[in-house]
Image (tube, rainbow, N blue to C red):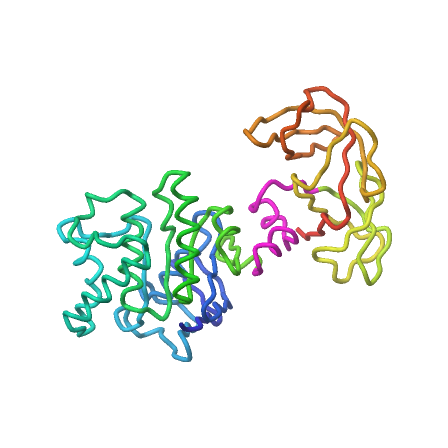
Amino acid sequence: MARVELRGVTKAFGLVRAVQKADITFEEGSFTTLLGPSGCGKTTILRMISGLESPTSGDILIGDQRVNEIPIHKRNLGLVFQNYALFPHKTIAENIAFGLKYRSVEKSEMQERVKNALEVVRLPGVEDRYPAQLSGGQQQRIALARAIVIEPSVLLLDEPLSALDANLREEMRVELTAIQHRIGVTTIFVTHDQSEALAMSDRIIVMSAGNVEQVGTPREVYNAPRSEFVANFLGAANILQGEVVDSGPDGVAVDNEVFGTFPVSNGDLDGLRPGDPVRVVMRAEKVKLSRAPHGDGMAAAGQGSVEAVDYQGQVVRYFIRSGECQLQVIDMIEDRPFAVDEQVFVGVRGVDCSIVRS
């Protein structure tokens, strides 16, 4: 295991800055996800850590060693790409052992390490098969076995689940997380899929346009986003305009046209004073609908009408119109779902709201 650090790292391609002065630490033994839309710089960071790209400025450290000029084959890294990059003409054993050939490993030890790697990924006994004889999920596991058989200091995963169908992706993200916990290797995972990041990570680094927007645990970045970008990128969010009417050590009171005045104790609260305009994030699944006024449990309450209904199987997404504001509400299917044009009461708890800045 090794700690990985980026210190003021910038990567420019001509006039385009793919990564801008990134200061990031990937803790030893952690599973950290670089999350963001296409073109945000997450894969560029992975490629710089691996040695496939060189930073324009700044330093990259693996352990205590600066690795900017060290070639990829001397960094002791395991890499898994989204297309697996298996050799179709080589057996599974030959594919997995490929990296060991260049490490002067004895044949008997090589065979033992290949066998152990297959045990780790739960595919024992397939050494003599070829990639075309395995399913997509099995090929993904072989690519992972090839990466871990060299006993890397750091494991780099570039969207390794993107080629799988939805059900297999869910299965493999559980498997991948379990494997990482068993071997304990420092893992850096790149994805644009929010559900993957939230389900698998110890920490998430949310990126946009080459910049780090927020770093935190899945719970922190989801429940307390620090920017509108993070709020919108992770899940369905309502972002309402409001004004601070009171502030104190435990949070602020915000006035909004739909919900009136209510307390907010989460988010970017530093320096807020009465009269300051703010934006309040309310996650769609945290907003509650009812046919009768809400009780005392709700810090904020309003009224509206159902504008549209989006049935999604186990849950339903409602679009609620209240004056000039449209709200999204995600709720479990009940015996009598709300119907279009039905009048409803809308409520949310103060602990489920968060302040963001533009």
Q: Tell me if residue 192 comes above or below residue 60 in the rendering.
A: above
Position of 329 with respect to 165 (left or right) is right
Q: Nearer the viewer, residue 69 or 321?
A: 321
Magenta segment range?
215-239
Q: Tell me if residue 289 comes above or below residue 169 in the rendering.
A: above
Q: Image point 41% across, 61% down: which residue?
A: 180
Q: Image point 67% across, 34% down: which residue?
A: 329
Q: Quadrant of residue 107?
A: bottom left
Q: Nearer the viewer, residue 255 or 266?
A: 266
Magenta includes 80? no
Q: Quadrant of residue 235?
A: top right
* Residue 129 appears in the picture as rendered: yes
Position of 10 with respect to 140 (left or right) is right
Magenta includes 231? yes
Q: Nearer the viewer, residue 171 or 283?
A: 171
* Residue 323 appears in the picture as rendered: no
In the rendered image, residue 330, in percent from the top left (x then y), is placed at: 64, 35
Position of 33 with respect to 78 (left or right) is right
Q: Image point 63% across, 29% down: which residue?
A: 333
In the rendered image, residue 275, in percent from the top left (x then y), is placed at: 84, 52
